[in-house]
């Protein structure tokens, strides 16, 4: 199901409701397929906000994840959202987009915690979004081993509200 | 087909064949390959970093020693020049002709060492490097079509600028050499308010005939430039009001057909629009998970187009996307801030048509401090280009340190943290987006002063990034604020836009400061909401005893009758002229636009007119204060701050007590 988020005149909350509704329809049949679908829809909503930096993108991901957390099956949903948020930030960091490394580090523990809770392997999770899993998972492990935490400048923390 | 059509087709074919023969496009002799070197989105990054913002271009590169890759410093046009020379030498040695091309946003949103001279330094440097042709990007229109045409077509200095200081800064002799390359824009035409309705301000195409090489005849390549059609939504409207930005693929197809009729061997599109992959390593040519606005554009292109060189999305890729016939078209992008060059090698079949296209992204590695893996090598800077950049950097430093106007004390983003030391729940003791601040009020007042037609100005807390203060604060006052100081405080260089709102609509926007969309998004611990700074003369009170986080459109915290303009109650039905940044007002500036910081209330604004840049407005405002009469930071008292808080019947005043534990604590 493709939801025209950026074109629809409905409020974002209403649209999100539709998206969550689509999640309920599919969740019993194919979780990995659903993770892919939610990641794709997250991409369509939030990816355009990455340009000069990832601040607006980060807010977009947070907003969607927050709204999704109200739902019964929120863990899987939020896993897809945060994982996409992390991946898109790492991709942006590859090109040196300002604040992207910090955004990636912010989302990393969020999806890792849910991933552990619902017991999805790194490889299975990686396969929900196209790309080379060797380099992507190595980047993930490297980022965890760095133990840099949230190293963003003060104003980013302030901007995010932490 | 009737006779006339048959006749016309025959004549066209005859002309085509003649032209093809003349251009060397067909025949039995082989056509020499061509290697194109492409860059995009340089954004004026002539140096390796932006000293003001601290941004350094970095790139994660594949290496045999680490599957995660290695992140190294990249960029800088002196280093790019070296890479370009190296790649050119290799291509030439293999018998290929070469050309350096671009895909827009070469300038705009630039670091100060280019921006201080209206980006003439970047234009000059890229010209020295041999750039031949580029599409325009949206940022090329930042100073409007008039200045774009000056940059593209003339050697004139910036009107009103100071020769040798902020325009015409090339040496010796203080001059601007002009663009040594062609800017193309096939989907940009004049409208009825332009000088020639329907005409092109910039050429739509550029045709390059290469010389023969090693016994092979030279190819002729037609280039078409385009920029995304929604560009007017992202630039100063008054600067493009005489222009129409048409559908990209329609314009490209029209020009591609015409170029084919001229008998070119290949048609290359340079377009400032793009997409992104999900690859975590630079230079990946497998194109995983590609998406973006370039996809439907390519899907509507005819097979007259052989190659698409794209930009705008600050990503790197080499992809193959289906066109209207299902044929796979190579689409490339090199990244941004000068981090790489795409090498695109075109070979030709015996009939002169394109036989193959192979592309790869090459990083501009300037990292001499990191120990690089053996399979990566740092470039040495090109001395000629480096010398020119050094000249610009030195001159810009002089300009950036020129004082503009005086302040009597630090102008802060927050109130002094009264109660923070004992309350323990202030926003890290730094600042709080839920509170009115001296620097926020200064920016709103600056916006107001920038436009005499405006009655109320607004600015959002997120736009103000630093205090204005003396480097030796609390000493050093009155302090002469520099241009560099203002750029640090207000770095976004957003456009200002004025518009009409009724009193009721203004109230609805202010209610959104605490409504659902702001809750849990940007609030300091203990507080909810994001403040909108308002200009002098406009005051109101709000009641924190009313619920926060109400559904959008149902907030009820503004105390009825409290909104006043110069002491006169705001009428709910009267229209007022308001201005703010195009970011905050974005919900009302384009259909379907994302609301800036979730302030959807601006969607109802009427009669928007763009005018000015936020940082320029602040600069102009600060410039009105002298050492003898410096700007005095506003205090949280009646007559200075504008937003008064109540909690039920308790008057909390203008913010000083909001951080202290008690009834007026910055509670939800």
Image (cartoon, rainbow, N blue to C red):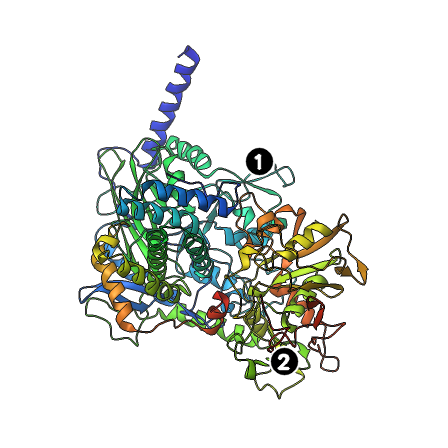
Q: Is residue B181 above or below residue B479?
A: above
- Quick check: can you spot residue B227? no
- On what subunit does the disc labeled 1 rest? B
- On what subunit does the disc labeled 2 rest? B
Q: Which residue is tagged 2?
A: B410
Locate residue A92 relative to residue B642 in the image: left or right. left
Could you tell me residue B160's position as x and y percent?
66, 62
Query: Do the residues at discs 2 and 1 belong to one chain?
Result: yes
- Quick check: can you spot residue A125? yes
Helix, strand or loop for disc 1? loop
Q: Is residue B337 above or below residue B502?
A: below
Q: In the picture, residue B63 is in which quadrant?
A: bottom left
* Residue lying furthest right: B568
Q: Looking at the image, which is closer to me, B189 or A12?
A: A12
The answer to which of marks 2 and 1 sits earlier in the sequence is: 1
Helix, strand or loop for disc 2? loop
Could you tell me residue B329's position as x and y percent?
31, 40
Q: Looking at the image, which is closer to me, B479 or B116?
A: B479
Q: In the picture, residue B398 is in which quadrant?
A: bottom right
Could you tell me residue B364's position as x and y percent?
32, 64
Q: Looking at the image, which is closer to me, B361 or B618?
A: B618
Could you tell me residue A112's position as x and y percent?
30, 62
Locate residue B90 relative to residue B266 in the image: left or right. left
Q: CA distance from mark 2 to mark 1?
A: 53 Å
Identify the mark at residue B434; answer none if there is no mark. Answer: none
The structure residue drawn at horizontal position 22% and vertical position 53%, both measured from the top left corner, is: A124
Q: In the picture, residue B625 is in which quadrant?
A: bottom right
Identify the mark at residue B198; answer none if there is no mark. Answer: 1
Which image quarter holds the N terminus of chain A? top left
Locate residue B102 relative to residue B580 in the image: left or right. left
* Residue lying furthest top: B2
């Amino acid at each position: 199901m493709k939801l025209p988020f950026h074109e629809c005149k409905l409020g974002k909350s209403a649209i999100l409701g539709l998206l969550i509704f689509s999640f309920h329809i599919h969740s019993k049949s194919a979780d990995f397929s659903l993770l892919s679908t939610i990641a794709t829809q997250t991409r369509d909503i939030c990816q355009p906000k990455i340009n000069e930096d990832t601040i607006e993108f980060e807010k977009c991901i947070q907003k969607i994840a927050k709204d999704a957390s109200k739902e019964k099956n929120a863990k899987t949903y939020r896993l897809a959202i945060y994982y996409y948020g992390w991946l898109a930030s790492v991709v942006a960091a590859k090109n040196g987009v300002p604040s992207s490394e910090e955004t990636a580090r912010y989302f990393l523990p969020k999806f890792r915690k849910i991933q552990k809770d619902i017991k999805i392997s790194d490889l299975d999770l990686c396969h929900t979004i196209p790309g080379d899993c060797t380099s992507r998972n190595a980047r993930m492990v490297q980022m965890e081993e760095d133990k840099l935490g949230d190293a963003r400048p003060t104003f980013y923390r302030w901007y995010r509200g932490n | 087909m009737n006779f006339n059509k048959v006749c016309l087709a025959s004549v066209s074919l005859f002309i085509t064949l003649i032209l093809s023969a003349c251009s060397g496009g067909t025949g039995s002799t082989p056509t020499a390959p061509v290697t194109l070197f492409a860059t995009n989105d340089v954004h004026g990054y002539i140096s390796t970093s932006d000293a003001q913002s601290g941004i350094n271009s970095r790139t994660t590169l594949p290496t045999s020693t680490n599957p995660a890759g290695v992140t190294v410093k990249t960029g800088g046009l002196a280093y790019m020049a070296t890479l370009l020379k190296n790649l050119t030498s290799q291509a030439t040695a293999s018998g290929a002709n070469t050309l350096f091309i671009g895909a827009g946003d070469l300038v705009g949103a630039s670091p100060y060492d280019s921006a201080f001279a209206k980006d003439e330094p970047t234009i000059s440097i890229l010209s020295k490097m041999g750039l031949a042709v580029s599409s325009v990007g949206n940022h090329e229109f930042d100073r409007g079509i008039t200045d774009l045409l000056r940059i593209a077509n003339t050697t004139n200095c910036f009107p009103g600028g100071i020769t040798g200081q902020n325009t015409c800064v090339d040496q010796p002799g203080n001059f601007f050499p002009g663009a040594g390359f062609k800017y193309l824009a096939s989907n940009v035409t004049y409208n009825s308010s332009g000088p020639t309705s329907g005409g092109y301000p910039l050429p739509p195409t550029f045709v390059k005939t290469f010389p023969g090489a090693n016994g092979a005849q030279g190819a002729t390549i037609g280039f078409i430039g385009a920029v995304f059609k929604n560009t007017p939504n992202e630039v100063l409207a008054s600067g493009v009001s005489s222009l129409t930005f048409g559908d990209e693929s329609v314009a490209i197809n029209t020009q591609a057909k015409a170029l084919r009729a001229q008998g070119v061997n290949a048609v290359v599109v340079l377009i400032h629009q793009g997409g992104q992959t999900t690859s975590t390593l630079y230079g990946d040519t497998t194109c995983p998970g590609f998406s973006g606005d370039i996809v439907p554009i390519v899907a509507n292109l005819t097979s007259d187009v052989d190659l698409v060189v794209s930009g705008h999305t600050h990503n790197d890729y080499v992809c193959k996307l289906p066109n209207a016939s299902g044929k796979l078209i190579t689409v490339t992008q090199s990244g941004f801030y000068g981090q790489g060059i795409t090498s695109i090698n075109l070979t030709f079949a015996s009939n002169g048509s394109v036989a193959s296209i192979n592309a790869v992204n090459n990083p501009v590695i300037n990292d001499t401090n990191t120990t690089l893996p053996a399979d990566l090598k740092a470039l040495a800077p090109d001395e000629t280009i480096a010398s020119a950049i050094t000249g610009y950097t030195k001159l810009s430093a002089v300009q950036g340190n020129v004082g503009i106007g005086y302040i009597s004390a630090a102008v802060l983003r927050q109130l002094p943290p009264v109660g923070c030391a004992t309350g323990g729940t202030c926003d890290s003791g730094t600042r709080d987006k839920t509170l009115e601040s001296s620097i926020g009020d200064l920016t709103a007042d600056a916006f107001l002063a920038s436009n005499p037609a405006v009655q109320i100005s607004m600015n959002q807390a997120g736009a103000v990034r630093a205090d204005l203060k003396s480097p030796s604060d609390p000493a050093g006052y009155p302090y002469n604020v520099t241009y560099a100081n203002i750029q640090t405080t207000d770095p976004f260089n957003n456009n200002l836009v004025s518009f009409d709102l009724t009193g009721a609509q203004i109230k609805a926007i202010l209610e959104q400061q605490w409504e659902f969309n702001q809750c849990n998004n940007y609030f300091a611990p203990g507080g909810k909401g994001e403040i909108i700074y308002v200009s002098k003369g406009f005051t109101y009170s709000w009641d924190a005893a009313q619920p926060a986080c109400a559904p959008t459109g149902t907030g009820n915290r503004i105390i009825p009758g409290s909104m006043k303009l110069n002491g006169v109650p705001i009428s709910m039905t009267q229209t007022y002229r308001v201005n703010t940044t195009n970011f905050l007002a974005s919900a009302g500036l384009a259909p379907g636009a994302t609301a800036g910081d979730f302030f959807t209330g601006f969607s109802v604004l009427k009669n928007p007119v763009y005018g000015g840049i936020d940082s320029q407005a602040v600069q102009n405002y600060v410039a009105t204060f002298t050492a003898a009469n410096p700007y005095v930071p506003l205090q949280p008292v009646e007559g200075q701050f504008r937003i008064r808080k109540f909690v039920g019947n308790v008057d909390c005043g203008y913010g000083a007590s909001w951080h202290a534990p008690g009834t007026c604590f910055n509670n939800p």
